[in-house]
Image (cartoon, helix red, strand yellow):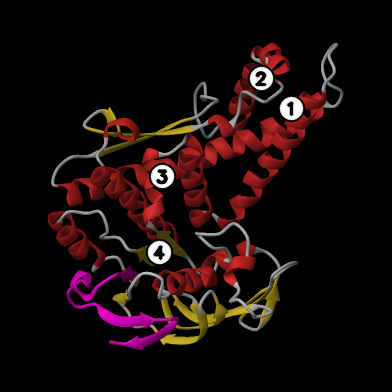
Amino acid sequence: MRLSWVELRDFRNHRETRLEVPPGVSAVVGDNGQGKTNLLEGVYYLFSLESPRASADLPLIRAGASSAFVRGEVETGTGRVLVEVEVRPSGANRVQVNRSPVRRKRDVRQKVRAVFFMPDDIAVVQGEPDERRRLMDAVVVSLWPARDAGRRAYDKALRQRNRLLKDWEGGGTPAGMAAWDAELVEAGAALTRDRARAVERIREAASDAFAELSGGDRLDVAYRPSVEPSADPEDLDALAARFRERLAARREDELVRRTTLVGPHRDELDLAVRTLAARSFASHGEALVGALCLRLAQARAVRDEVGEPPVLFLDDPFSGLDPVRRRRLAGTVSGLGQVLLSVPDAGQVPAGARTFRVEEGRVAAA
């Protein structure tokens, strides 16, 4: 899978940018605040229809512009895919694939694949469990784009169930709880299975990448679900039965605390280096390498799933790494398919990479 060219118009500080993207590794060089991360973000938006940095689209539109435009062409094993997006400040964006309108993100994500790493991903290792749950869900969606509907179904059931618990005035069980229990169990069992599958896909690859970059130490990755399957994790009926048992056992506690205490929103992803929890004991460098290796493993899992590597975006990947790890990472990225990375100075550009310089939202080949 390879991006051939991309155009950004009124995206962040890029008034009008067009880039012919070569195969292999391309490095975007620029001082802080010049727009190199904005460029990677805009190109990634073409693949995902969402930003890795912002939860809303309004900040993506250049000040003074009414909307932003991103368009580009991706070469895949099944043919060329032209994606065109008008990013609007409110309401639905206008998206076309090969000149035909599409309404769902999955319609784009099933055709083109990408993985994005940024320094803030260190929160996956050092931050709260919610960061690790987001990582697991990102892997699920990158592997099986249609499964995003399952996570949204679970989130809806969880919100409704928590609202019932919050508004409950005492006496018996809140009205309507049984219906939302059923929704929660059905969606939650499927989400638990999907996360288990996703973690199994990245576990070994993340550990191998960590050993390669760190010089021997391995990253232990283990999924710890709120509802442990009693037998085969692929058996949704058994998992749902186990889920219902756990809900019944915690019912009184939930009524006291007015919130749902069982389900995938309580899952954890255990990460350890030298048998010690990475969140508490990993150094800054180890945590950054761990976060990076989880994304590299995600990219390899996508490659294995679809038969070709996704486009890999690495925003400032060498920041915070010692010289030895920088050299190892530079050697690793050359074999990962098409890679777009950003660096603050030319001294960090990997050997053989095509270089582009960004200054005040303008891009030129270096």
Contact, mark 2 vs mark 1 (Cβ under 8 Å): yes
Contact, mark 2 vs mark 4 (Cβ under 8 Å): no
Residue kind at label 4, given as amino acid type: Gly
Between marks 2 and 3 in the image, the one whose residue lies nearer the viewer = 3
Residue kind at label 2, given as amino acid type: Leu
Rounded to the nearest whole Å, what is the CA distance between mark 2 and mark 1? 8 Å
Q: Position of residue 304 (x, y in %)?
A: 38, 57
Q: Which residues are magenta?
A: 341-366
Q: Position of residue 249 (x, y in %)?
A: 64, 12
Can residue 83 be spotted in the picture?
A: no
Earlier sequence position, callout 2 versus callout 3? 3
Task: Identify the element where label 3 is drawn.
Answer: helix
Contact, mark 1 vs mark 3 (Cβ under 8 Å): no
Between marks 4 and 3 in the image, the one whose residue lies nearer the viewer = 3
Query: Where, by quadrant of the figure, is residue 174 drawn?
Result: top right
Residue kind at label 1, given as amino acid type: Asp
Residue kind at label 3, given as amino acid type: Ala
Residue 95, labelled with which disc? none
Q: Which residue is mark 4?
A: 307
Task: Identify the element where label 4 is drawn.
Answer: loop
Rounded to the nearest whole Å, what is the CA distance between mark 4 and mark 1? 39 Å
Rounded to the nearest whole Å, what is the CA distance between mark 2 and mark 4? 40 Å
Between marks 2 and 4 in the image, the one whose residue lies nearer the viewer = 2
Residue 53 higher or lower than 82, as above or below: above
Q: Which residue is mark 3?
A: 123
Q: Which residue is mark 2?
A: 247
User: Which quadrant, please, contains the N terminus?
Assistant: bottom left
Q: Nearer the viewer, residue 96 or 327?
A: 327
